[in-house]
Amino acid sequence: LMRTYDISSSLSLQPLDALRIVLSGSYGYNTRKQDQFVANRNYNGVIRSIVGRVKQKTLRFTGRLNYNITPDLTVQYYGQPFITRPLYDRFAFASAPMAKNFEDRFTVYTPSQISFSNGVYSVDENEDGTTDYSFSRPDFNFVQFRSNLVVRWEYKAGSELYLVWSQSNTANAFNELNDPVFENLFDNAFSQDQFRNIFLVKWTYRFLK
């Protein structure tokens, strides 16, 4: 019922004994057959459970850096821009969900039964020229950038000070479905409008010798 294809690569660099950099990227493409729920709609007193096929693209890049300034003072960084885009098609309703044959469980709308306009699918199930029910386009585009910077200082054996800076950005790109995912990711992931910053200080002290 589901097919998944993934391509990934990783590069590790250690220009200094105290410095390690890891860069990686992955691209995934998966499809699910006609079983992804979209909406429930009433049709002549009967609930139509509408489903669709999903084709989803996911692209992510990850960077990690570890730097030991001294044995007691370290810096760590993690950053990841990420995008996923599920697109739905081949809409149908569940007509015989317990049927042995998977394809017999759904009734696919014909081109004369379903139409799309302004983000809404309209269904004329009995083909009398009047819309019987409708549902919103379920496709979406999710773009996010997450990063963490951690400075750790063991100022005394067993006693540590942590300085943490966490940054995240969930861009407003929900409806940007037509651009290539690579282009869309870098147009939105580093947008300054949605950035959220969190700063944290953690201090520990060991009293026992």
Image (cartoon, rainbow, N blue to C red):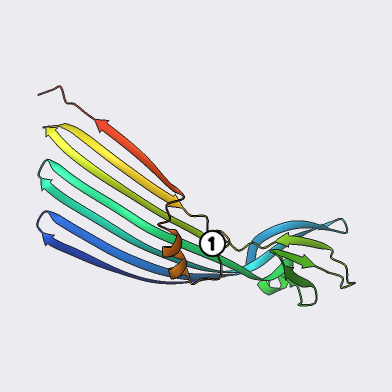
Q: Residue at x 14, y 62 (%)?
A: 14
Is residue 95 positioned above or below 67 on the image? below
Q: Quadrant of residue 164?
A: top left
Q: Residue at x 33, y 38 (%)?
A: 199
Is 82 or 10 nearer to us in this picture?
Answer: 82
**Residue 58 location in percent, x, y?**
46, 66
User: Which residue type does callout 1 highlight?
Assistant: Asn
- Total residue callouts: 1
Q: Residue furthest top?
A: 207
Q: Residues within 10 Å of mark 1 (few under 14, many from 20)?
A: many
Q: Can you say which quadrant of the picture contains the C terminus?
A: top left
Determine which residue is flagged by label 1.
Answer: 141
**Residue 192 location in percent, x, y?**
42, 52
**Residue 4 location in percent, x, y?**
47, 71
Is residue 202 positioned above or below 193 on the image? above
Assign a secondary structure to mark 1. loop
Is 31 or 75 nearer to us in this picture?
Answer: 75
Q: Can you say which quadrant of the picture contains the N terminus?
A: bottom right
Q: Residue at x 49, y 63 (%)?
A: 84
Q: Quadrant of residue 32?
A: bottom right
Q: Residue at x 70, y 69 (%)?
A: 91
Horizontal side of 198 relative to 162 (left or right) equals right
